Image (cartoon, rainbow, N blue to C red):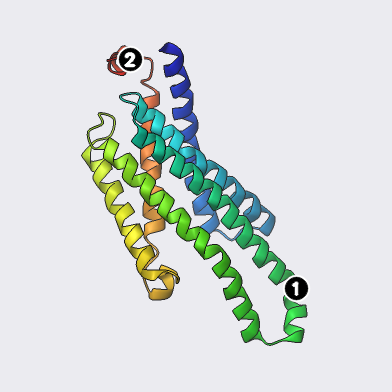
Amino acid sequence: MEKDIALSKQWVQFGGLSGILSTVLFLLLILIDIPSYLEFFFAGLFGIAYALIGFGIHHTIKLERDTVTSRLGALFVFVAGVLFNVMLMMQLTFRGQLEMYRSEILALTDTELFDQWIRITDTLQLGIQFSIDLMTAFAMILFSTVMFKHRFFGPSWAISGAIIAVALVVVKCISFPLTPGELGIPFVLGPLISLWFLAVCVQSLRVYKRIGTTAVDANTNR
């Protein structure tokens, strides 16, 4: 049991720090104009960090009770992170190639056709984005069902996560195959999801400081 707790403690710390790192990278990528080589590196690192968040959340939940539900949530977040990495690398590669040969392409065609090519390449990664959003939403719902009566989280964490997740599924299904932005829907769900996972990771790190104390161990072993 002590070895299990020690291992869970490592996962909680690693997952919690990965959640903070992914949030920082997310803000860097959407708010700051950075050189292309840094953008490529940060985008790849973001997908890796995002993939590890669910494991930290699961092991925080596991301290009270181990459930298939939280394990599935961690698995869905991991898959979403891997897909995020693939999508961002694909997007940046396509954009980089088109921009590299922009002058040569425009010498053979017009600007309107060039812009159409960009839109076509974007559609190749929109399907992956839809899969990422579904995986993330289902993970949030799964975690929320366990969090509702969990002593380290509670109803506020569960309800907020479930509402954001359901809203994400509804918006993405309504707008598909277009993006919500193309339908005039404000870009708010992405930041809300990031903030929810950040808050959960911070809470997990707060729990991390208590792992190994008499109070936590007593409830873990019950």
* Sequence-first tag of 1 and 2: 1
Picture coordinates of residue 36 (x, y %)? 67, 59
- The x, y position of residue 155, in whole percent, is 21, 40
Up the image or down, 119 lies above or below 14; here it is: below
User: Mark 2: which secondary structure?
Assistant: helix
Residue 89 image-quadrant placement: bottom right
Along the line of sight, the residue nearer the viewer: 90 or 208: 90
**Amino acid at the residue labelled 1:** Tyr
Against 62, residue 72 (above or below) is below
Residue 143 locus on image (x, y percent): 33, 40
Residue drawn at the location 45% of the way across and 70% of the way down: 177
In-image side of 36 versus 33 (left or right):
right
Q: Quadrant of the C terminus?
A: top left
Q: Residue at x 39, y 40 (%)?
A: 73
Residue 206 visible to the viewer: no
Q: Which residue is mark 2?
A: 217
Does residue 53 appear anywhere in the picture?
Answer: yes
* Residue drawn at point x = 67 percent, y = 61 percent: 93
Q: What mark, if any, has residue 101 been given in the picture? A: 1
Question: What secondary structure is found at the residue carrying circle 1?
Answer: loop
